[in-house]
Image: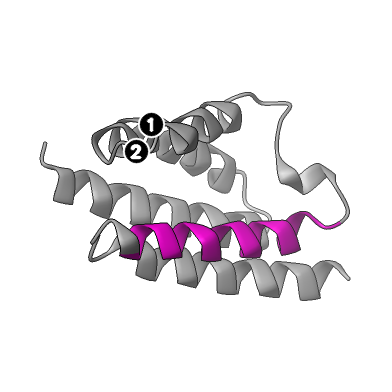
Amino acid sequence: MTLKAIEALVSIIFFSNKVGMLVGKKLGWVLGAIGALLSIVYFYFLDLRVYMLAATYLLHPKNGIWKIKWGWTILAATHLGAAYIGYAKNQPMFPHYQIASAIVGVFGALKRY
């Protein structure tokens, strides 16, 4: 599998994960776990070891930013940061989906508060 294919899968799966979480579907959690596994490989090839560690954190079922009051807001901010790094690494698809996920995070924050 090429890096471009992994980038596409991670981008689409994580965006779908956020939409699923927003509308309250359990499939969102499953997609999040699949996306986290793929993102470990993706970030490894981009030499982003810190993001690899963050992705492994997402795999633990008791973890997640959804358990804290400002979870959706933090989600939006971290996705904007990931978009910036994606642009810096010259990734054509990943940053755009990160921005889209940040927008979902804003809707999640508005829905929650």
Q: Left of 9 or right of it: where is 106?
A: right
Spot occupied by residue 19 in the image (x, y as percentages of width and height):
55, 62
Amino acid type at image mark 1: Ile
Q: Left of 50 or right of it: where is 65?
A: right
- Residue named by callout 2: 43
Report how far apart the C-alphas of labels 1 and 2 lie in the structure. 5 Å
Q: Say which quadrant the C terminus sits in.
A: bottom right
Q: Is residue 86 above or below residue 3?
A: below
Q: Residues within 10 Å of mark 1 (few under 14, many from 20)?
A: many
- Residue named by callout 1: 40
Q: Is residue 71 above or below residue 31?
A: below
Quadrant of res 70: bottom right
Disc 1 is placed on an element classified as helix
Please say whether residue 83 is one of the residues in the magenta stretch. yes
Q: Is residue 100 above or below residue 59?
A: below
Residue sitting at 30 percent across and 36 percent down? 47
The answer to whether the residues at label 1 and label 2 have Cβ atoms under 8 Å apart is yes
Q: Left of 86 or right of it: where is 57?
A: right
Spot occupied by residue 102 in the image (x, y as percentages of width and height):
57, 68
Disc 2 is placed on an element classified as helix
Amino acid type at image mark 2: Phe
Q: Residue furthest left?
A: 2
Magenta segment's dominant SS is helix
Q: Over which residues does the magenta segment extend? A: 70-87
Q: What kind of colouring is applied to the model shown? A: one colour
Q: Say which quadrant the N terminus sits in.
A: top left
